[in-house]
Image: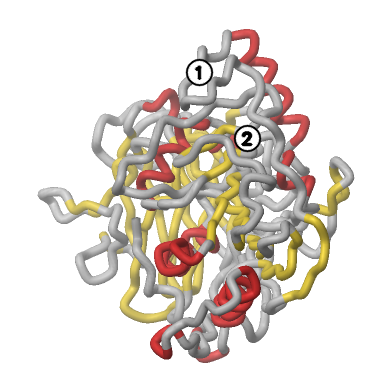
Amino acid sequence: MPVASQGVVMGKFLHSHLVLAVASVMVIGLCPWVWAQESGLRSMNTAAPEFPPPVGFGATSAGGDAGPSPGQMAQAAQAAAQQRPAGASPQQVVSTGSPAPPESTQAGGGGITWINSQPLTMAQLRGRVVMIDFWEPTCINCIRTFPEYKKWWEHYHQDGFEIIGVEDPEFDIMDSVDHVREAVKRFQLPYPIAVDDHFQIWNSYKNDSWPNRFLIDAQGTIRYNVVGEGSDAEFERAIQELLKQAHPGLEFPAADKVSAGENARAPACGESTPEMYVGDWSGRGVLANLEGYRDGKTIDYQAQSQVEDGRVVLSGRWQTDRNGMIYRGKHKGEEPGADFATIRYHARELYAVMNVSHGHPSRVYITQDGHSLTAANKGVDVQIDGQGRSYIEVREPRMYYVVQNPEFGNHTLQLFPTGSGLTLNSFTFGNDCQTHFAHL
């Protein structure tokens, strides 16, 4: 993920130092590619685009649908693949725990699926101050913003503030609306979510990153924009400003005075290893094996003695895929074998996006610097078996919390799969100032 100096992360660029023109949109996705210098609060003055209508697949207005036929599902999958900006992949959604979100309204074939809400329009939202947040469930930059966004929604919603989370997929594991629903529940996001798996809203906003937020006034005009993480104090002051404009006489108590926030990209926080794409992801893969990538093919990879920082070396039978590398070794039950993936990194925390074939749970054992993780440095998704070995039970496609070191440092991580079908999509990292968020 990174390259940057001071300031908070802008997010993930969809291409390192390259801008790809796709579907008339300049794509620079932030959550997965390059850390950029904080852009700060940018003023705008343009009409907010209307949301695409929720049509297709027999959508209903009460939250429920007739369901797509197999043919429709195939057509929708093909359409999604064609619409996705080059380099863009699924990002994860968030939802709320109480009250339980209503059933989603399915809108396939180019429409929008709504979670936590009936279908909305910008016309319906007129009179409210609205934040549009482009996010993705596997994007750590997005996940770290959720606590602040939930705080804003809970604090200012009664004054006429609304958040619409727009989910656009990065990896193909987030093409499933059900996976987005699961992420919404896990992250406990209380506000409406629009699943934009055909990138229609993304394109209408000429969006280029995850996360990216736009602030719209009560007249339906986009007034401010912040790309990526950071600038939260500026953004909250803008929320208050627009709410006061919409409701003359509205005053906020002294306790609501916004103070300057922490700069999580300050030099003292440490500069982490950039995000690592394990698969052949738009030419950004970090595989260091001499055998290289072999599109769609499964080959025997030979381990190397040296691994550079920010690179991955594989050992054993692995299949090349755009979204990640898929382990194809023989099933070993729940015991670690001789095959593994090795990475070198420098950071405080490490996160991994992983998936399993056909939803079959698969255990992956983990060591750092030659030792199993312990209670002092393991991520919240790591368990310890009776022999003191650390592992993660990969049950669903998502981002897993692997390592939470007590301090910033350089490390070698190894993962030992136990069954065929485990996919390693990417590794992302956090510095000393990016640890204070709910690891859900």
* Amino acid type for the residue under numbered disc 1: Asp
Q: Given this view, does label 1 or label 2 mark the residue nearer the observer? A: 1
Crowding around mark 2 (Cα neighbors within 10 Å: few <14, some 14 to 19, many 20+) is many
- Residue drawn at x 85%, y 41% is 23
Crowding around mark 1 (Cα neighbors within 10 Å: few <14, some 14 to 19, many 20+) is some
Residue identified by numbered label 2 = 321
- Residue drawn at x 47%, y 67% is 156
Would you say 210 lies left or right of 425 here?
right
Circle 1 sits in a helix, a strand or a loop, which is it? loop
Would you say 274 lies left or right of 144 here?
right
* Amino acid type for the residue under numbered disc 2: Asp
121 relative to 214, above or below = above
Cα distance in 3D space between marks 1 and 2:
33 Å
Disc marking residue 212: none
Q: Nearer the viewer, residue 329 or 36?
A: 36
x then y, percent, for residue 99 = 30, 45
Which quarter of the rendering shows the C terminus? bottom left
- Residue drawn at x 46%, y 35% is 179
- Residue drawn at x 40%, y 39% is 182
Furthest residue to the left? Answer: 386
Disc marking residue 65: 1
x then y, percent, for residue 55 = 66, 23
x then y, percent, for residue 61 = 53, 25
